[in-house]
Image (spheres, coloured by chain):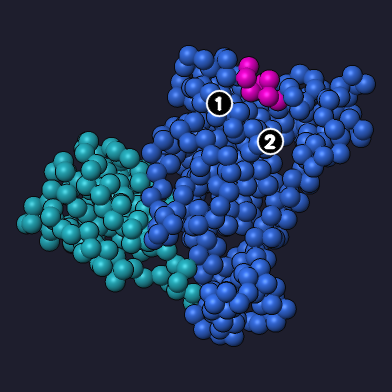
Chain colours: A blue, B cyan
Amino acid sequence: MSGAGALDGRTVRRLSRAISTVEDRADGYEEILSGAYRAPAKAEVIGVTGPPGAGKSTLVDALTAHWAGTGERVAVLAVDPSSPFSGGAVLGDRVRMDRSSDLPSVYLRSISARGEGGGLSAAVCDIVALLDEAEFDRVVIETVGAGQADIAVADAADCTLVVFVPGLGDDIQAAKAGLMEVGDVYAVNKGDLPGAKATVAEINGAIGVAYAGTPGVNKTTAGLITAQPASSPGRLAVLRRHGDPASDSTLWRPPVQLVSARSGDGVPDLAGAVDAFLGWCSESGRPAQRRRSRIRAQMLRTLSAALIAPYQQNAGQAAEDLAGSIERVLASATSPAEAVAELIRRGSR
Amino acid sequence: MTLSNRKIRVLMAKVGLDGHDVGARVVARGLLEAGMEVIYTGLRRTPEQVARAAVEEDVDWIGISILSGAHLTLLPRLRRLLDENGAEDIRIMAGGIIPQEDIPELSKAGVSRVFLSGTAIAEIVDYLMAETVHD
């Protein structure tokens, strides 16, 4: 192995084992994380989401090879769904990672969602901390790709890339309420298929309803205001992420890039659009905010796991109280909401 | 130690010039149903690629499906590559078309178990459950 960001075998082995320990919450994981979260967080985290079949894995492969080619050390976390019945998983993203997986500065890890909704696994943010400690320049997270609800990545990533393909038709309309709200950059993959340019125009149109200006960075001017009411929760989220005309001198409008992951056409431009967004974020003072939202999401996740854990044991006061509550709900004596409120009041461990 | 959380992870791979992966897929499905995490690499991988993937994925086992007849070359090479990368604890099982008389040589080269064709998936699952050691 050679090159600027090349990884040596021992580092990879240690990192890989640490990731398993953290995923499994096995002995020693607290200590591992305590070290990892004390390392400076410098990796740019790119989240890639989109409907199934959009070509996310192939695009992640192409982007990863591109960034590794510029001398960066790049990690890929490819999340796939787990079986609701057995908790097992078949993780097949490596099959499409031919261009990047042999490069010396690339680390590729398949992650099972392990029952977590939203397209990520509970451990993903912790794993990002481990990768920061291992001095990665960039982390690319590929979500499960189950569809509209696959948006947890927006809380975890510094830049969220939403991938569509031509031919989804009305699905883009349907996806508006989810995927169309989280993208910092949009890509239309399989750009050589008929209708690709029309799909780009369609997505641009949908973006234009919520954003003024032209794709990319815009100077804030008096004319650059959309018709949307400024105080709605969705609006406030846009202002927070992409610039507020009242307080920012520049605004970001998500661009839509035509790309063909398989042939590589448009990949450098797409990578450029992602980096332009990251550059705008840092100029407008937003990276800290992105990191704060990642930590908040992980805190909430960790908190909920910790609160639930005693009730999931096979024995103990909490488990007994829960079993008792279940019986009362079964006997039509109370509702789950009332029973849970009672459990929380009692606070048994 | 919190035993319940520890997942058995298995890399299923096809090495060399060998285009049939039905067997590998059937085993992958069986391991999934037993609650294991299976990483599938796709066809025509080199032992170098498989060893690297196994270390990155921190698997307990590598399952090699091989129908090409090159098992006496490819499997010992894979074992050697793992050992050289400090992954002595990642174990190899193999299946496919492997003559019975080759098994002793493969055992000596560090292949933990060979499953001949016709093996029930349940036998593989039981074996992995019994043999996997998490430190």
Q: What secondary structure characterizes most of the magenta part?
A: helix
B129 sits to left or right of A226: left
Which residue is at a point 40% across and 59% down the rendered structure image?
A85
Q: Looking at this rendering, what residue extends furthest in the bottom direction?
A: A317
Quadrant position of the C terminus of chain A in the picture? bottom right
Q: Residue at x 47, y 17 (%)?
A: A193
Q: Residue at x 68, y 35 (%)?
A: A181
Q: Which residue is mark 2?
A: A181
Residue situated in front as seen by the camera: A88 or A279: A88
Q: Which residues are magenta?
A: A201-207
- Which amino acid type is shown beneath numbered disc 1? Asp
Total number of numbered labels?
2
The x, y position of residue A339, in whole percent, is 64, 74
Q: Chain of mark 2?
A: A
Residue A266 appears in view: no
Tell me if residue B11 comes above or below residue A65 in the rendering. below
Task: Kindly identify which numbered label has been placed on residue A170.
Answer: 1
> Which element type, helix, strand or loop, lies under badge 1?
helix
Residue A323: image location, x then y, percent = 54, 79
Q: Where, by quadrant of the figure, is residue A250 drawn? A: top right
Question: In the image as oriented, which residue stretches furthest toward the left?
Answer: B101
Closest to the camera, between mark 1 and mark 2, is: 1
Question: Which element is circle 2 on?
Answer: helix
Of label 1 and label 2, which has the lower sequence position?
1
Q: Is residue A206 magenta?
A: yes
Tell me the tag on residue A271: none
Q: Residue at x 58, y 57 (%)?
A: A122
- Toward the viewer: A1 or A330? A330
